Amino acid sequence: HTTLDSFPENFLWGSASAAYQIEGGWDQDAKGPSVWDSFTKIPGKTFKGTNGDVAVDHYNHFKLDVALMGEMGLKAYRFSIAWSRIYPEGRGEINEQGIAFYNNLINELIKHNITPIITVYHWDLPEALQKEYGGWESRNIIEDFNNYCMTLYERFGDRVKDWITLNEQNIFISHGYLEGSHPPGVQDKKRMYQANHIANLANAKAIKSFKSYVSDGKIGPSFAYGPAYPYSSHPESVLAAENAEEFVNHWWMDIYCFGKYPEAAWRYLEERGLAPEIKEGDMELLAEGKPDFMGINYYQTGAYEKNADGVLKGAKENHDGKKGNFTESGVKGLYKRKRNTYVDTTNWDWEIDPMGLRIALRRITSRYGLPVLITENGLGAFDELEKGDSINDDYRIAYIESHLRQCREAITDGVELLGYCTWSFTDLLSWLNGYQKRYGFIYINRDEDSEKDLRRIKKKSFYWYKSVIENNGENL
Ligand code: BG6
């Protein structure tokens, strides 16, 4: 475009986090254990054996953290609630101390004119439910999850109007039940599709309940959307990308928005005995639980090629920040993901593709016709704490700036964009990659070996984002 539309006046300039990655206080005030509390303790699962027992101790520093958000002028803050703080056993009696923590956090945000955005589930399933009935593999979870959500709506819905149901269902399900790199560490395709179907039902039910509790609110999922590109213009490559888009994206987004599984993928799975079991009433529920917007976490796109020779395995992730370990992944006969040589990569081999974000926003707009909230986007990088407590993270500024420019292009294209949350406000625990992979505007003085003093230090990007917000993005 030669001239660009402005960001809307009430645009949510935000930042995001997740309970397990920042809070710490893992057993404080009667919190129950989550599956991540135990998974991270299994030797060899995470980089240098790191866990979130203390994390960046936001639980005991939340006032300071929110004051920093206020100083920055942040308009919105997306955080997740730890289910096992509210229900230590996943259900049963409410732990009022857990409610109190989030009430205090919400009130503190509002005091600083920051719109709270709640994620009800960011992967930290109460361990009791995993042990009792296998978590997402049992239909019992639909009721328990709904009950937990209704408690949140009831207690916080008076002040919180923007809600996210499941964070990256596609990731926690595929990593938990196919790759086995997340809890519960299962590697079984059939079980994966089944658990995913149950998560779909839980998501739809929680959305349906929402309307009667927070009638003036908005709710949607946060989907990890990586648009699929054809590796070349060879028709086989284009077909591979179509297949990938259907299997890695529409498989989830179509369910959310249309209440239906995409046809070609369904048939492929059915032929192989992998399709989930649909019970009476399932499809009706899925059709009723439609979101008000599509939340997306955008990090990268994927380039796909035909997969006649059959790469079957998932990609091995690089957890040590040493570039160059990209492995092809895919589904035999359908597609395999190749390294896209047109774009640069991060130290953890994630492709950096700002235009891919515009493409993502356009695709959602034309397929689903829903407004979009970018619930995560950001750069994980090594930061260097220099003399005088300064961190010159120009690479992070460049990353966010280039993505925001594409957002503005997309708005000019006609995309209804509600807001943009960076990942993340403070540095935090990167699930499997320890504390070295930093995402924040605020540096936290700790590493894998020591909690040090957990000092909060503003990075250069803090001041930069502050000025973007002040100018409502006009200076981009
Ligand atoms: C998203 C998650 O997948 O990406 C976040 O919602 C996560 O919780 C973020 O931290 C970055 O991933 P990673 O592996 O770099 O921490």
Image (cartoon, rainbow, N blue to C red):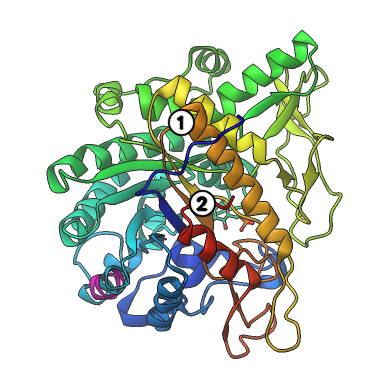
Mark 2 Cα within 10 Å, few/some/many (few <14, many 20+)? some
Q: Is residue 16 visible?
A: no
Q: Which residues are magenta?
A: 99-106
Q: Which kind of residue does numbered mark 1 sit on?
A: Val
Ligand 1 is in which quadrant of the figure? bottom right
Q: Main secondary structure of the magenta part?
A: helix
Q: Is residue 224 visible?
A: yes
Mark 1 Cα within 10 Å, few/some/many (few <14, many 20+)? many
Label 2 CB-ligand 1 distance < 8 A: no
Q: Which kind of residue does numbered mark 2 sit on?
A: Gly
- Quarter of the image where the N terminus is located: top right
Q: Residue at x 49, y 36 (%)?
A: 5
Residue 375 screen position, x and y as percent:
46, 49
Residue behind mark 2? 473
Q: Residue at x 40, y 75 (%)?
A: 66
Q: Residue furthest left?
A: 212
Figure check: 132 above or below 313? below
Q: Position of 356 compared to 384: left or right?
A: left
Q: Position of 341 compared to 388: left or right?
A: right
Q: Nearer the viewer, residue 436 or 11?
A: 11
Report if the CB atoms under discs 2 and 1 are less than 8 Å apart: no
Residue 175 screen position, x and y as percent:
59, 46
Membership of 437 in magenta stretch: no
Q: Residue furthest top?
A: 235
Residue 474 screen position, x and y as percent:
52, 50
Residue behind mark 1? 415
Quadrant of residue 219 in the image?
Answer: top left
Q: Nearer the viewer, residue 411 or 36?
A: 411
